[in-house]
Image (cartoon, rainbow, N blue to C red):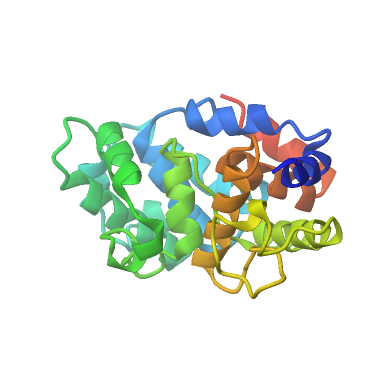
Amino acid sequence: MRSVQCVLDRYAEDVPYDALTRGFLEFDRWSGDDPRLLVAEAAASTTGQSFHGGIEPAVSRFREAFVETGRTDSLEAIATLEVDDDDLVAALGAHRKRHVLIQIASVLADRSEDDDLAALRGWAGDADHYRYEADPIGSITGVGPASFQYLRQLAGVDTVRPDPTVVAFLEDVERDLEAVGIDNDSEEAGVIDTAEPGSVPIDTSSPRRTIASCEWLAICSSYRMLDLDRIAWWRATDPGEREATMAAQQP
């Protein structure tokens, strides 16, 4: 485990991952703990845009048009919106985002919890990322494994999003671990067995295996899954984009 820790420590150096992680776990971000905005943020992420370049502007427009005006005071109210509602089109743009927003709101509004945030957190805590297609939110057209996991992160769950930044990070870590001699026969590699004998048990060939690889790293180190996600994002993002994103995410 010392080798895994040392390799990850090098990647984490100068990355404010702890503060970034707390922002999600403690709802200390720009959207706070408003489930309407959290669901809108997840929906806005489904077309692959960056936070500063696409997600934040879309959610800000949604907040101005639907939250601040009182037009939607609950997820149930969002669920009743028409996908082609003029204000919704102006706020979110792409049909995929609008469809996902309404469908997620509908699923959560049907849960038994007393309020919307409890419903979102209850769903996120129970959701199984290894069987996301069978989940009522994971089965929504337009919700892939990355957006599924992002919604869980927004709900305060310590997990990772299997997106290209995490894949690239894992591939770099894998090379470094192989260089220090960790293989599938070592004590450190005994947690999962997705790799071929003689190789580091990191596998990014599918979203599920990507998540499992991060779980292994978290078990073998002091880093949370969400820490690894934030370290990967930081290292893959241009400094100017990082600065703008962090400024926009302040509560």
Above or below, 2 against 145 in this view is: above
Q: Residue at x 35, y 70 (%)?
A: 141
Residue 142: x %, y % from top left: 41, 68
Q: Nearer the viewer, residue 130 or 116?
A: 130
Q: Residue at x 31, y 40 (%)?
A: 120
Q: Nearer the viewer, residue 132 or 10?
A: 10
Which image quarter is the C terminus in?
Answer: top right
Residue 76, image quadrant? top left
Q: Residue at x 64, y 63 (%)?
A: 201
Residue 29, image quadrant? top right
Above or below, 129 against 12 in this view is: below
Is 77 situated left or right of 143 in this image?
left
Task: Look at the image and tell me whether residue 73 can be seen.
Answer: no
Is 36 situated left or right of 223 in this image?
left
Residue 155: x %, y % from top left: 41, 38
Residue 41: x %, y % from top left: 47, 46
Residue 90: x %, y % from top left: 46, 54
Is 13 situated left or right of 84 in this image?
right
Above or below, 150 against 116 in this view is: below
Task: Look at the image and tell me whether residue 63 can be seen.
Answer: yes
Q: Nearer the viewer, residue 105 or 216?
A: 216
**Direction right: furthest residue:** 179
